[in-house]
Amino acid sequence: MTVGDAGTRSRALSLRARVLVGLAAIALFAIMAAAAVTLTTQSYLVSQVDDRLLAFSGPSHGIGLGDADDYPVPSAAEEDGEGSVATPSTATTDWWNERPSDAVRGVLTDTGTLVVQFQPNIYGDETFDAPLINPADLSRSSLTYITAKSAGGREYRVLAKPLSSGWEITAVSLDGVESTTQQLVMIESLGIGALLMGLGLVGWWVIRLGITPMGRMVDASTRIANGDFDVRLEGARSGTESAALATSLNTMIGRLTDALSERERSEARLRVFVADASHELRTPLTTVLGYAQLFRKGALASKADQADAWGRTEAEANRMKRLVEDMLELARYDAEPEMHTAPTDLTRVVSEVLTDAARAHPEVTFTAGGTGPLVPDVTGAVTAEVDGDRLRQAIINVVTNAAQHGASHVVVSVTPESRGEQDDVRVEVADDGPGMTPEVAARATERFVRGEGSRSRSTGGAGLGLAITAAIVEAHHGHLEIASVEGEGTRIGMVLPEVQPQQ
């Protein structure tokens, strides 16, 4: 397996698997460390026992110089053979028994019989169980340390010193070492058990707090990727990374959902706009094409018919031109046009618009009302920071719209208006026309919407006047307000930012 394959396998592990593998590695390391401590401690204790054996055995006077005859070795008739134990008379050991000791002293013959000279006297009435030693395990030229068991299973640490015939034996029971080792193993087992339990709790806590919420977020993200935008992600408790990630993703999903909804609404509005624009353009194009065909076929023989046809063709062409110009104007406002603003006297602008409107619509009465001074050094002036030409177009659109929809009296007023700490200027156009239904009034600023709810052109226009007006007012950081009651008239207010008076 190559390094790349190993890296691929490592990357293929899930986060949950990596946490579990890491915890298992810690547990394995702890077990190995405990085993090493146990073996080291046992070796140290055995080495201490070896030091005691050497102290118990006394001086050697040179290895190999002793003589087995110095020990009361039993006769051949008394020997039981290899691995047997013989005990001398009690008289020779009475003085030893008076001293507390856990050591075994004696001599091992070449045949394997252990002649015990002194035996432990600290175990009370417990029956002495001497170690069984095999001469083949001992050296005849140097000290030998071995571990031997007795017939009853007790372990002894044995020091053997070579003699001219046999070995001098000193042995100590390893019960203390075994007891200490067992206690250490028990303590380590309890510690490792507690460690494993702690690691298990940590693993459960990490998985529950971090990995499980991540899994839920992956599932929710998959559903979102499949088109279910109503799903929201759930993280762990607040303050955790998964909760912060879930909150961020939910915010992103919410904005994405809003963007998609807005795109759908825009596409719907675009389809309606295209359909309405196509309808508006189709009528004048049909008229122009119809008269052109009549002229080509010779159906317009008289001068009067030709003059009428050319007049109608020109009127429809002008209508189509105005429609295209209005749509281009709206497109420019959609693209955030550059505004050339300056302090402008709105009362003068309104007066000029009303003068022109009275000439264009003599059947309608136009009145300027509600104006009042806001700037002390300009009597009768209401000044706002606007683009004069564009605002003039907005007011003309509203006034013309009122005159064309059957109003007999149109009142245009310019008044100050306070909005908290913000001072604004309100230009309001009120008429006594037929008004609009609440449904139509709510959509009055949409493109190609007419107050009479039909596509009749008897009143002129294509339903873009108020849409252009709303775009102009919004470009001035203002807003348009429409209030209409069916049968009583309409009031349209343009709220614009005011120029602060000079101190």
Image: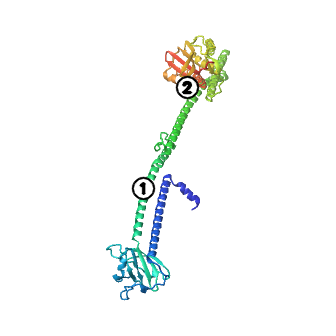
Q: From where the camera sits, is residue 129 visible?
A: no
**Residue 80 in the figure: left or right of residue 264:** left
Tag 1 residue: 197
Compared to 76, does 199 lie above or below? above
Amino acid type at image mark 1 = Met
Q: How is the image coloured?
A: rainbow
Label 1: state its secondary structure.
helix
At x 41% / y 60%, what residue is drawn? 190
Q: Using the numbered discs, state the Cα–Cα distance from disc 2 to disc 1 in whole angstroms.
A: 69 Å
- Residue positioned most to the left: 125
Observer-nearest residue: 400 or 491? 491
The picture quadrant where one finds residue 335 is top right
At x 44% / y 57%, what residue is drawn? 195
The N terminus, quarter of image: bottom right
Tag 2 residue: 446
Mark 1, Cα crowd under 10 Å, few <14 / some 14-19 / many 20+, is few
**Residue 414 in the figure: left or right of residue 296:** left
Observer-nearest residue: 337 or 155? 155
The C terminus, quarter of image: top right
The picture quadrant where one finds residue 302 is top right
Amino acid type at image mark 2 = Glu
Label 2: state its secondary structure.
loop
Observer-nearest residue: 51 or 323? 51
Query: Which numbered disc, 2 or 1, marks the residue that appears first in the sequence?
Result: 1
